Image: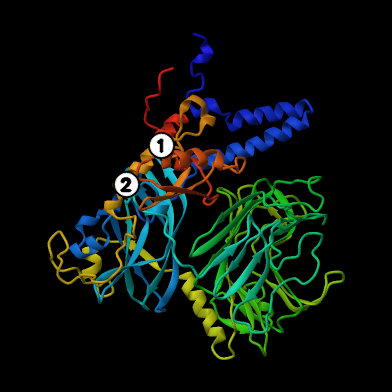
Amino acid sequence: MSPYRRNLEPTRAERTDDVETKIEILRRALAEGNHELALGVATSIKEGVEGERTLLADPGSADVLSSNWCPVVDLPNAWADWAAGWALYQCLRVSESIGQARGGEPVDLLVELPFDQVMSPGRELRVARVDREAASPTQVTSQVYGVLRRGTSWFARLVFEADVPASGDALYLVFCGNPAAELPDYPSRMQVSGEGAGLQIETPDYVAKLCEQNGQLESLTPKWHTGGMQLASHGNGHGEPPNIDWAHDYMSVGPFQKMRVTNWDQCPSLEVIRGPLCTIVRRFGFPHSPAHPLFTPSRLFMDLSYTFYAGVPYFMKDGHMEVTRDFCTLVARDDEWYFGGRPFDSTLWMDAEGHVYEGKPPEDNADHMWGVGFFHGESRDSMFAIYLDHRLEKPTGSEGDESGSAALGPEGTTPAKLYHHVDMTVDHAKPGSGPHASVWCRPMLRDNAWLQRGTTLVQRNAYLLAPYPAQGGAAGLQQLRERLLAPLVVRVEPLKVALYSDPSAGTDPPDRGTSLPDDGVGRLEGDRPLARIGERAADWPRKQALWEVMREVIDDQFSEKKASLVDLGYIYDVHARGNDVRVLMTMPHRGRPKFEFLAKPLRTRLEQEPDVRAVVVDFTWEPAWTANLLTDVGRAKLGLGDAPSVDEPSS
């Protein structure tokens, strides 16, 4: 038999080339002056790193551990009947600590789930709030994103909105372990349209438009304003699209050029999360020169995210900037907003204690500002930024003072020091920049700051778009800051402890044995059960048969490996209603957009089943397919080393 009839590439490591191998090809291509090859392999290096990140990135420390899940059958009988179809639950106590009632406050948790008992976190995770007075659970809207598989566990981000009384707590139940579950279709107060970075996000409070080119905020339109006000630049940029968010950038020494994220012709790396409760737009890469790619310094890596929530009038911006080599910057800015047309006539600022003042800050406070904004004295329109976190973290072992300064650099430079200063004006005018505007700008570094490799700059800002009332406006901003700095505390607790103890009073639960009794809990008459039609335990045998049938449909681009659409993780959801079946599927990447190549044989095979009359195959790119969706069989067929062995067909 020819050696080429044998499988000479049995594992993933032999079916691809690792990053080190590609770097060696890149070095050789550059040494030979083969720049076309160098460009090709540079792209392949990025793609290889993306693959490694998918399989190896650390998900972080879970808030809810796999070992904490309890059997649903241990719930009171009425609750277990209500949650029939689900196998596992956890009880969360959500507590408020500063005496401010929270209504619809977003809670975002990292949840670990057992892989052998959960088929799909996106379909199966559900959240219910426990009404203590009625002693009954009610399902609430939730959102799942960022699903990873590591070893024998799933990891997923779970978002829900919590209602918690001042200085009190509330109980929530999280459920998983229902293979018949379908992707939930919750009503949402958030509408998202557009593709890539160019999204439009509409909430009950505002409409946010992001720039298609670079993902920066292009405009904000408040919903409460009857005059149709839109916050936008209303003018030209510096050759790039005009936005209202002009950060982040830094000026090289000389001064010579400004390196801007607004100069991106497209986001170097982009991740978008959409759902009923929040939309997250994350962009990361190095800022670009005005003459890119003539100058392409890789000195200050920027990882930036916007997070928009459906139920609150503010949105968040998180920034993590890492110094990748020692260098000097004349000035660097991490928060700059430009509102054209003078929509405001007055300024606001916040000190380190959270007190809010109108007007310009005095000199002794100018470098200690932790919030800034504008308002209009007549209309009371306002936009305010609350700076929740702003840190410069020095590399281990570096010299520096307690103020955050880094080690001394070459002559003519100054130790890097993080400033909390904000320049602001309601009547900015610059030749060639268009009409007058209101502008604030935070130069985080200045004076030829010397930055050491390994230094990181961290920021977390909240932006409130809401009226600023003449009475109580400052107090409202201070209270919002207090809430954001003291988020709800979530603890996993046994249900018996959570139901029958009062943590504020320090009381222990009464001795009720090892299990919960049925007395004292509601019977849930008339309450809609957790399982919808198609998700009940009685629905699983039919659905299981459909899943098994779909395992016969393969992606023949993997030749003799016979990897099925199910084991490859292409199938996201299955609905079976009577004799009609609806399947939601994806494709592995956008280089294969013609999904009918696989949808047609999938539809044909399902229609061969005697109890199937019609099949509809829908398609989605969201969430994007990753290797985390492979089953154990799929992992083995594609040669991932940690998968159990699978018998291959004989040659």
Mark 1, residue position: 551
Q: Work out whether 88 lies above or below 546.
A: below
Q: Quadrant of residue 367?
A: bottom right
**Residue 460 seen:** no
Q: Position of residue 283 (x, y in %)?
A: 62, 54
**Residue 104 seen:** yes
Q: First in sequence: mark 1 or mark 2?
A: 2
Q: Residues within 10 Å of mark 1 (few under 14, many from 20)?
A: some
**Which residue is more in the foreground, 388 or 549?**
549
Q: Amino acid at mark 1?
A: Arg
Q: Amino acid at mark 2?
A: Arg
Q: Quadrant of residue 126?
A: bottom left
Of the 4 image quadrants, the one containing the C terminus is: top left
Mark 2, residue position: 542
Q: Residue furthest right?
A: 431
User: Under tag 2, what secondary structure?
Assistant: helix
At 30% from the left and 51% from the top, the residue drawn is 539
